[in-house]
Structure formats: structure tokens, C-alpha cells
């Protein structure tokens, strides 16, 4: 196997099958090894992209339209790196999380966890390198099945119901998407994204109804307001590493598909009103998710609702791509959105892991029970604080840069009303992060006993949080990588300074 | 990248930044290590700042530039006004650290406290040396984040409420600042601070937009600079421990706001250009209102720290007022007051802390005859108070003298009326406590001094030192390297003769 | 009405029936059946498209899609049914509570 593409897909899927056959004890360690290996493969692919430009790969040597083409540009490479980095750290975390000797039920949990976990990783990788509509469907569906099973893993009525709601919504969404794909195939006669983009540029318009199906289906999976209802309980009921990965990566995967199709393939077919509508739904998601996060009493539900809000930001980039005239702001909007995806992935991963640690130690995750956290779990408090900073978008976090770029785009494209939304969202997220932090600083009434927490859990969330901060301190390289094969240019000739 | 001279500003930041991080990870009982690290870093910082001052006067240039994102750099640069601020902060950091070690003896969470304390100073240094707006914003927000845990350090209901108020104000201001800075960048490109302003060449065509942006910038900086009506958080934040109040009021937070106003007016817009846009007269009026309002409110406060807080509101606006008056003499008044107000106010807060810590005195009405029990503290308090009133030869006189002269020079005769009114009011709220302390008979029997000194030397020495500095800064204002000398250096750069 | 149009119309009807079942029925198994009817509608449409695109033989790509789609749908259905059974075991009902969970 001479290509990083093969490793990216083969390692996790083969690992999923093998760990399923292996005895339970060796599973977590093998999973860890394979996620690290996948990270190495992602790094390999990213460095190829960095040096040589976008990479293509024809599976089994068959070219499109008959064969399956894999493809990676800067965007794919960055998301692959994010995925394997978050999952590696979450795997470390799960070593501690599932090692509670006392409870037999959690042991079976842990046994089923590993193969599903690797399938999830494989599906994410496959999704980010897929280059045709139907492969994307398969990857999305694998992702759903692995994700639902992982949510339901915790057992108990709440988790099962949450998993069921998630499955029903995602299953429906997949079928809507597939309906759209069928209609698009009827129109274009091909599935390969590049070929469709060519045809669309050549004057063939994608039927509105087909795009409506596709984006509706993907919008449900990305938890775009008002299709978000399935998300909070699914993400809050899952075991901690699963919550982290669902919020950090799986939701983003659906958004990634929207971004690809909207910008790279159907840029000429989507209209300005549609873009404004997408932005409006995103804005509604920001407000709604934030208000819910302010009302919830359980820590994990707060964090989950904040995912609804943060996904809303991503949809703001679509209206910002419109506007009169040439300008570098299109890159700002697009790259700002992508950077927000990444920064949020690390921050939200850290937050869910930290929340899981608190739940593990205290036995419940009521916010009122978090009192005295600074004394009992100082490292977790620090990661909580840092991830909170990134969530609000304060410097020096990656989200700050993302917000900076989105704000620049709002002003340069003369759509100031989105700047108001971004500002309001910042203050609202500040408010719900404040609730959590101030609870942690309240010193009195420590719980009588807390369960000792394996160090690896605390440090995994800390490293994730620090990474989201690091993205704000060192943004030049990620942006250079992102520009490889990007649909927009950083600098538009004749404009700007 | 970092030129050879660039290491200086970087290491000035690093002394406190690294120590802050190390302290977070120190175990709570390791007081000696922590104290040693704190004092050592503070001394090292003073030495480094002194080297920078010496080198700068000799004509050396120190600049560190890092690629940040897109066309933006992080830029740390030593210039005259940054040295003024950095010199003040580094000296007061040392004294406040000593004071805090004494003040917090035997209280919990000292690692956390000193960790954030150091981060706070790092942010302040970053603000001082920031060479462009984006770097400024970065450290400005970091300061908000780092001071919040200090304000709520005690964790009481009252402290948490004050912390909430503080965050609402500063996060709101921070968001507005971000919008203003991004907006300015979209018009004028990346903005590096330049003496005399840089906008006249870059963006003179958009006068209305520039006016609105100016209002947004000053409005958001005015939160920390406590301009009426944005001052509400400052008196509330009094619940913080005394060293924090001292730091907030004299060095870090409020000065960051005032310093930002100096940067925006003199180094971004340029005072002549700002004046040609008719922006400075409104600013001068707002500053004057704040001066009078703060003094009036201070009169009515019985709580010593609240009285000092309103006095800060008032005194700070002398800086803003001096900035708003065109002309080198007023600029000197503003800049020198930046230092003088810091030294005098920190003295007063140290004294208030000593009274509270030693005798449990919190109110002006309890001060009768206290000078007999604590002569050194009350001498320091008297020097600070008289300096605030503007009595020669204490530092405050130098500031007011220059402000008055500058106002005359710019034909702002009404400013003299404001200054006179304010001085009378200052006298009205500082004379009664001073008189009561020295000349009234004690109402209660004070507990005897624990040792030879009236209170712990770690509380006494910093107060005496800053009182002495307030006196010397005024009496020896003509000496080279005095605050006045450096302020005049700045004025020469900003208003080339 | 051409053969393709006939089948496409039938697919539309099936799709509507499935959607109705999914949203109106409260029992989980019925919801899953509704989803499967939607799936059948999509597959029918794909086969109709394969027929329309025929040259010497029907377009093979939609066939491959349908085959894969069936496999995926069966897996998802199996998971859904297993979940429904576990929910019934745990709560005694094969329905989800109407309101957002408060427990």
C-alpha cells in the first residue's frame, strides 16, 4: 500500500473488524495504536498536499465515471488531521474512562465501543476524501450507524431513546439526500463531483427540487435550526468520548458535505436568496441554541445546545460568499468558516471530555454540583476555561481568528446585519460559558467523596483545549494548507493592499 | 521574524508569562518557591524594562514580528509611550506582588491567584508593547480573561455578582472593540501604530465611516477606562482583594483602556486628523463630565474603597481629557498622569487594604484618630490624597499643571473651570478622612501593634515606597528619566516641533 | 405517459406514503416501515432512471447504487429494530414520549 489514501481507509475499517474478533482486553490499546496510525497517514497526506497540491487517487485503478475517485485538497487534509487528532486524544481518554473496574456493565460497554469507534473513524476519513455523490451517501450512512450505536451504548432508557431519535432523524435525512442524488443523477448522468461541476459550469442547471432534497437532508444531519431537535439529547446521553467526537466531528462532516457541494459543485445553481436563507437559519440556530444553553441545568446538555449554536456560525458563511464585486472577503468568509469548524472541533471535544470527567468524578453533571471544581479537579477546570475561551471566540483562540475573518467578510460584503448576529452570539456564548465557570469558582460545600479520576482523562481534555488555543497563535500554516486547491484566493488581483 | 533587538519585548512578556504558567502547576503549600519565583520575575522584568528605556533613549530599535494570519502580523515594538506604561506596570507589579504575598498569607488558592496575577501583568505588558491594533486587541481580551478569576477570587456571592457585572461590561466592550478594529482594517488595511497617526494617508476619504469607527473604538475602550456612562463595573469590582483592586485601578485594567485611547487618538487617527473630523471636542466633553461626576459620587461614599473607586473614575478621565486637547503640553499632562495616577492610586489602595487587614476599618467614618495607631500608613495615605488633589510638590500637581497649561494653549479655557472644580471636589472628599485620622480622637480602643511595626512589613513597605515615589515623581520631575521626562519624549514624537 | 414517467410518478406516491407514515405514526416499528417505504421510492426512481438512460442495456450505475442502498438501508433498519426492542424492554412501550425528555 503506497498511498496515504489506502491507509486512511484501510487502517480503521480493518481495525474495526479485527478488534471485533479479538478478546476484550487488548481492544482499547489496539484502537489507540490504529488512531495514532491514522493520524500519521493524515499527516502524510497533508504533507503531500502541502508540497504537491491536491492529491487524487483512483481506487483499484479505475478512473471515474466507472471507478471511485478519492481526492484531497487543503480543506480535506485539514479536516482529516483534525479528525484523527481529536479521535486519538479521545481514545487516550477512553482508556481511563472505560477502565472503571467496579461496574460490570461498563465493561461490556467498552468491548462494543472499540470496533464501533474505529468504524466511525473510517467513515469520517472516507467522507473527507470522497469525490462522488453516492460515496458521500455511503460514508454518511456508515457514520450514522456507528454514531447511533455508540450513543445507545450507555444503555438505559434515556440513551436508547436519544439514540432512536438520532437514528430516525438521520435515517430520514439520508433518504432525502439519496432522493436528491437520484434526481441529480437523472439530470447529469454522473456522480463524480468534478464532472458534475464541469457540466454545471457548462450550463446544465441542477434542478431546484434535487438541491432542495440534498441540502435538506444534509441540514438535518448538520443539526441546522430548525432540524436540530435530535442533537442535544443524543450528544448529551452518549459516553463522554462519544459525545466529544459526535459534536466535534460528526456534525461537521455533514456540514463539510454541504460546503463542498454548495461552493465547489453547485456554486452557479444556488441563488443569493437561498444563501440569505441559510444564513438566517444559522443565525436562528445561534440564538436558539444559546438561549437553550442558558436555561439547561445539566452540564452536558449545555454543551450540546452550544453545539447547535456553534453550527449556526458555519452557515453564516454562505450569505457572506455573495455580494457585489470582486474581493478577498470571499476567501475570508470561506476560510473563516472552515477555521471555525476546526477550532470548535478541538474546543468542543475538550469541553465534552471535561464534562465527562466531572460526571465520572461527581456522579452527576448538574451545574449546581460543580461547586468547588477548582479545588477538586484543577486540570479539568483549566481545560474547561480554555475551551470556554475558544467557544466564546476570545483571543488567543482559533475561533477568534475565525470570527475576525467572518466579521471582515460581513463588512467588506456590506452585510453588516450578520456582524450584529456574530456579536450577539459572542455575548450569549460568553453568558453560558460564564454560568459554568462561575459555578466552578464557587468554593463552598464540596461533595463528601469524589471518585478518583485517571490522569489520562484530565490531560486528554487539556491537550485538546490547548490545541484550540494553539490554532489562534499559529494560524499561518493552517491557512497556507487551506489555500491549496481552495475555491477562492487569499488575495484578489488588483484589490486590497 | 524576531530581529536581534526583538528578544527584549518578548522576554519582558515572558518573565511574567512563564512564571504564571509555572505557578499554576505549583502545589499549594510551596510558598517559598512561589514567592521566590514571583519576586525574581518581577525584578527581572524591571531590569529588562530599564534596559529597554536606556536603549531606546540611545536610539536602539526593538521589534518582534510574527506572521499571524493572512496579511496580519503580531507585532511587539518598543516606543516611548509603551515604555512609559511598561515602566509603571513593572515597578508596581513588584510592589503589588510583595503586598499580595503579605495580604494573602494563609488564605487558600494562592497558586491560582498568583498564576492569574502574572498572566494579567503579561497581558498588560503585551498591551504596552503592541505595535498594531490586532496585537492590542489580543492582549486586551486576554486581560479581561485573566482578571475575572482575580475579581471573583473570594468566591462569595458578592464577588461572583461583581464578576458577572465585570464580564458583562468588558465582554460587551471587547466585542465592540473587535467590530471597530475589523471595520477599520477593511478600510485602511493592517494598521500599525505610528506617532502622529496613520489614517490621514490611508483612509482620509471616508470621513463619516471614520467618525463612526472612532466612536465605536472609544466607546469600547471607554468601558475599561471607565468613561461615564460605562463606568458601572468599577465601583462594584471593589469586592476583590485589596492587591487586586490596586492592580485593577492603578495598573492593569483601567490603564489598558486609557492607554488604548492614547493609542487610538495619537497613534492611529492622529490628534490633528481626529480634530479635523471634529472628534476631539465631544471626547473632551465626555471626559469632563466623567471627571466631575466621579468626584461628586466619591463625596457621598462612606466605604473607603468605594470612595477611591469613584475617585479613579474621575482621575482616569484626566488622561482622556489631556488626549482630547490638541497640543504637546496637554499630551504631556495626559501621559504623565497615566503614571502619576497609577502610583498615587496604588498607594491609596495599599493603605485602604492595610486599614482593613490590620484594624478591620472599611469606612471613612471609622477613621477618627487612626493615624496614632498607624502613622506610616496614614502618612502614605495623606501623600496620596494630597497628590490627587494636586498639591505641589506631589506628582498630581505636575499632571494638573500641564493639563491646565495645555488647555490654555488650545484655547479651551472652560477646561480650567473643570480642573478647578474637580480639585475642590477632590479636596472635599480627601480632606475629611485625612483630618479625621490625624486630628480627631479615636472612638474605639485600637488593638495594639503585633510587633515593632504597625502591621506586617510586607504590607507597609509597598505603601511607603509608592508614597515616596508619588512625592519624588513630583518633586524631582525635572530629572532625566523621570515620568515627566519620558512623557515629554513621547509628546515630541507625537507632535514633531 | 411514458414508462419512465409512470414509474417516477409511482416513486413520488410511495415517497409521500412513506413520509406520511413516518411523521404520523407514533409506534417505532411503523416509523421504521415508513422509512423503508421512502427507501423503496428512491430505489424505484433510480431503477426508472437506469431504464431511461438505457443504450444496448440499462444503465448499470443506478443498479449498483440501489444494491448498495439496500444493504445500507437493511443495516440501518436492523439497528432501528434492535433499538426499538431494547426500548420496549426498558420502558414497556414502543413509542417515544411526546415531549422533549425531561428525565
Image: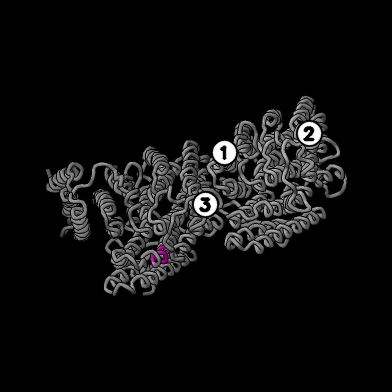
Q: Is residue B373 magenta?
A: no
Residue B440 circle label: 2
Residue B169: mark: 1
The 10 Å Cα crowd at callout 2, few under 14, some 14 to 19, many 20 or more, is some
Label placed on residue B60:
none
Counting from the top left corner in percent of width and height, residue B405 is at: 83, 32
In this rendering, would A339 be left or right of A274? Answer: right
Q: Which quadrant would the C terminus of chain B be assigned to in this image?
A: top right
Q: Is A413 placed left or right of B472 in the picture?
A: left
Asked whether the beta carbons under mark 3 and mark 1 sit within 8 Å of each other, the answer is no
Q: Does mark 3 fall on the same chain as mark 2?
A: no
Q: Chain of mark 2?
A: B
Of the two numbered discs 2 and 3 in the rendering, the one whose residue sits closer to the viewer: 2
Q: Is residue C2 visible?
A: yes
- Magenta stretch, residue numbers: A90-94
Instruction: Find residue A55 and report its horizontal and vertical position in percent.
Output: 41, 64
Q: Residue furthest front?
A: B445
User: Residue under circle 3?
Assistant: A490
Q: Secondary structure at mark 2?
A: loop
Q: Is residue A275 visible?
A: no
Q: Residue at x 86, y 39 (%)?
A: B393
Q: Residue at x 67, y 39 (%)?
A: B362
> Front-most of B172 and A67?
B172
Judged by depth in the image, the label closer to the viewer, 1 or 2, is 2
Which element type, helix, strand or loop, lies under badge 1?
helix
Amino acid at each position: 500500500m503506497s498511498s496515504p489514501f489506502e491507509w486512511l481507509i484501510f487502517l480503521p475499517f480493518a481495525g474495526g473488524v479485527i478488534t471485533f474478533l479479538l478478546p476484550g482486553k487488548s481492544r482499547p490499546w489496539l484502537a489507540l495504536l490504529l488512531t495514532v496510525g491514522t493520524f500519521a497517514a493524515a499527516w502524510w497526506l497533508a504533507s503531500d498536499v502541502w508540497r504537491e497540491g491536491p492529491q487524487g487517487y483512483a481506487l483499484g485503478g479505475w478512473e471515474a465515471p466507472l471507478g471511485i475517485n478519492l481526492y484531497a485538497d487543503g480543506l480535506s487534509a485539514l479536516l482529516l488531521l483534525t479528525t484523527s487528532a481529536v479521535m486519538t486524544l479521545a481514545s487516550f481518554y477512553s482508556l481511563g474512562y472505560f477502565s472503571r473496574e467496579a461496574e460490570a456493565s461498563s465493561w461490556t460497554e467498552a468491548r462494543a465501543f472499540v470496533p464501533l469507534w474505529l468504524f466511525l473513524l473510517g467513515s469520517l476519513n472516507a467522507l473527507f476524501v470522497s469525490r462522488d455523490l453516492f460515496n458521500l451517501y455511503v460514508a454518511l450512512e456508515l457514520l450514522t450507524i456507528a454514531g447511533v450505536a455508540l450513543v445507545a451504548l450507555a444503555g438505559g432508557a434515556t440513551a436508547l431513546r436519544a439514540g432512536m431519535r438520532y437514528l430516525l432523524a438521520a435515517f430520514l435525512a439520508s433518504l432525502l439526500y439519496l432522493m436528491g442524488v437520484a434526481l441529480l443523477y437523472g439530470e447529469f448522468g454522473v456522480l463524480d463531483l468534478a464532472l458534475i461541476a464541469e457540466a454545471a459550469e457548462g450550463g446544465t442547471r441542477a434542478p431546484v427540487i434535487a438541491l432542495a432534497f440534498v441540502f435538506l437532508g444534509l441540514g438535518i444531519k448538520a443539526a441546522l435550526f430548525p432540524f436540530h431537535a435530535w442533537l442535544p439529547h443524543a450528544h448529551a446521553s452518549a459516553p463522554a468520548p462519544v459525545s466529544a467526537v459526535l459534536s466535534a466531528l460528526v456534525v461537521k462532516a455533514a456540514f463539510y458535505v454541504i460546503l463542498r457541494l454548495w461552493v465547489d459543485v453547485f456554486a452557479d445553481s444556488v441563488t443569493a436568496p437561498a444563501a440569505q436563507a441559510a444564513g438566517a437559519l444559522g443565525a436562528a440556530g445561534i440564538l436558539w441554541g444559546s438561549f437553550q444553553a442558558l436555561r439547561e441545568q445539566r452540564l452536558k446538555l449545555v454543551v450540546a445546545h452550544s453545539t447547535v449554536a456553534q453550527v449556526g456560525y458555519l452557515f453564516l458563511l454562505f450569505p457572506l460568499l455573495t455580494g457585489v464585486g470582486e474581493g478577498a472577503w470571499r476567501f475570508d468568509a470561506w476560510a473563516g468558516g472552515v477555521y471555525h469548524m476546526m477550532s470548535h472541533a478541538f474546543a468542543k471535544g475538550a469541553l465534552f471530555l471535561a464534562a465527562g470527567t466531572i460526571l465520572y468524578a461527581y456522579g452527576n453533571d448538574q451545574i449546581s454540583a460543580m461547586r468547588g471544581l477548582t479545588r477538586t479537579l484543577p486540570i479539568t477546570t483549566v481545560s474547561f476555561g480554555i475551551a470556554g475561551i475558544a467557544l466564546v471566540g476570545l483571543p488567543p483562540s482559533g475561533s477568534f481568528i475565525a470570527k475576525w475573518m467572518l466579521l471582515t467578510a460581513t463588512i467588506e460584503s456590506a452585510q453588516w446585519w450578520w456582524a450584529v448576529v456574530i456579536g450577539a452570539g459572542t455575548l450569549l456564548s460568553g453568558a453560558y460559558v460564564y454560568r459554568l465557570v462561575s459555578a466552578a469558582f464557587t468554593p463552598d460545600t464540596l461533595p463528601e467523596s469524589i471518585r478518583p479520576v485517571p490522569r489520562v482523562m484530565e490531560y486528554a481534555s487539556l491537550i485538546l483545549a490547548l490545541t484550540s488555543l494553539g490554532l489562534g497563535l499559529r494560524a499561518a500554516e493552517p491557512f497556507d494548507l487551506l489555500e491549496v486547491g481552495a475555491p477562492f484566493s487569499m488575495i484578489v488581483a488588483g484589490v486590497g493592499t | 521574524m524576531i530581529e536581534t533587538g526583538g528578544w527584549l519585548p518578548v522576554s519582558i512578556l515572558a518573565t511574567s508569562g512563564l512564571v504564571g504558567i509555572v505557578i499554576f502547576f505549583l502545589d499549594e503549600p510551596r510558598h517559598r518557591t512561589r514567592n521566590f519565583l514571583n519576586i525574581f520575575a518581577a525584578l527581572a522584568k524591571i531590569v529588562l524594562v530599564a534596559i529597554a528605556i536606556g536603549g531606546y533613549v540611545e536610539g536602539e530599535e526593538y521589534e518582534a514580528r510574527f506572521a499571524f494570519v493572512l496579511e496580519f502580523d503580531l507585532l511587539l515594538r518598543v516606543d516611548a509611550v509603551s515604555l512609559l506604561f511598561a515602566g509603571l506596570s513593572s515597578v508596581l507589579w513588584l510592589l503589588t506582588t510583595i503586598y499580595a504575598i503579605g495580604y494573602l498569607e494563609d488564605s487558600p488558592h494562592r497558586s491560582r491567584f498568583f498564576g492569574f496575577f502574572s498572566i494579567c501583568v503579561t497581558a498588560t505588558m503585551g498591551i504596552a508593547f503592541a505595535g498594531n491594533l490586532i496585537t492590542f486587541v489580543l492582549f486586551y481580551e486576554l486581560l479581561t480573561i485573566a482578571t475575572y478569576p482575580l475579581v471573583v477570587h473570594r468566591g462569595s456571592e458578592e464577588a461572583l455578582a461583581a464578576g458577572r457585572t465585570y464580564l458583562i461590561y468588558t465582554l460587551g466592550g471587547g466585542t465592540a472593540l473587535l467590530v471597530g478594529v475589523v471595520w477599520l482594517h477593511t478600510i485602511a488595511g493592517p494598521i500599525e501604530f505610528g506617532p502622529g497617526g496613520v489614517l490621514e494617508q490611508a483612509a482620509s476619504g471616508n470621513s463619516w465611516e471614520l467618525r463612526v469607527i472612532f466612536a465605536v473604538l472609544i466607546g469600547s475602550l471607554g468601558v475599561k477606562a471607565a468613561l461615564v456612562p460605562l463606568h458601572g463595573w468599577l465601583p462594584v469590582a471593589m469586592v476583590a482583594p485589596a492587591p487586586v483592586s490596586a492592580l485593577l485601578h492603578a495598573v492593569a485594567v483601567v490603564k489598558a483602556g486609557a492607554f488604548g485611547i492614547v493609542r487610538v487618538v495619537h497613534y492611529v487617527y492622529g490628534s490633528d486628523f481626529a480634530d479635523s473630523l471634529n472628534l476631539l471636542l465631544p471626547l473632551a466633553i465626555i471626559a469632563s463630565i466623567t471627571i466631575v461626576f466621579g468626584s461628586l459620587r466619591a463625596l457621598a461614599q462612606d466605604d473607603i474603597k468605594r470612595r477611591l473607586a469613584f475617585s479613579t473614575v474621575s482621575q482616569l478621565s484626566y488622561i482622556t481629557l489631556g488626549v482630547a486637547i490638541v497640543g504637546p503640553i496637554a499630551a504631556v499632562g495626559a501621559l504623565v498622569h497615566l503614571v502619576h495616577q497609577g502610583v498615587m492610586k496604588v498607594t491609596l489602595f495599599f493603605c485602604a487594604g492595610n486599614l482593613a487587614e490590620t484594624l478591620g476599618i472599611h469606612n471613612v467614618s471609622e477613621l477618627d484618630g487612626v493615624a496614632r495607631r498607624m502613622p506610616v500608613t496614614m502618612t502614605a495615605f495623606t501623600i496620596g490624597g494630597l497628590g490627587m488633589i494636586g498639591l505641589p510638590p506631589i506628582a498630581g500637581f505636575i499632571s494638573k499643571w500641564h493639563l491646565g497649561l495645555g488647555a490654555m494653549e488650545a484655547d479651551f479655557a472652560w477646561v480650567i473651570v473643570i480642573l478647578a472644580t474637580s480639585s475642590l471636589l477632590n479636596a472635599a472628599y480627601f480632606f475629611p478622612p485625612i483630618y479625621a485620622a490625624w486630628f480627631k480622637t479615636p472612638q474605639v480602643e485600637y488593638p495594639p501593634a503585633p510587633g515593632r511595626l504597625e502591621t506586617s512589613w510586607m504590607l507597609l513597605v509597598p505603601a511607603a515606597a509608592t508614597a515616596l515615589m508619588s512625592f519624588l515623581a513630583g518633586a524631582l520631575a525635572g530629572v532625566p528619566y523621570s515620568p515627566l521626562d519620558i512623557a515629554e519624549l513621547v509628546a515630541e514624537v507625537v507632535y514633531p516641533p | 405517459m411514458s414508462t419512465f414517467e409512470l414509474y417516477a410518478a409511482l416513486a413520488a406516491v410511495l415517497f409521500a406514503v412513506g413520509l406520511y407514515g413516518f411523521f404520523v405514526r407514533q409506534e417505532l416499528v411503523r416509523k421504521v416501515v415508513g422509512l423503508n417505504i421512502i427507501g423503496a421510492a428512491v430505489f424505484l426512481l433510480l431503477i426508472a432512471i437506469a431504464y431511461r438512460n438505457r443504450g444496448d442495456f440499462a444503465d448499470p450505475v443506478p443498479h449498483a447504487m440501489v444494491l448498495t442502498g439496500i444493504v445500507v438501508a437493511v443495516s440501518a433498519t436492523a439497528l432501528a429494530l434492535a433499538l426499538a426492542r431494547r426500548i420496549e424492554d426498558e420502558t414497556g412501550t414502543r413509542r417515544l414520549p411526546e415531549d422533549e425528555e425531561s428525565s
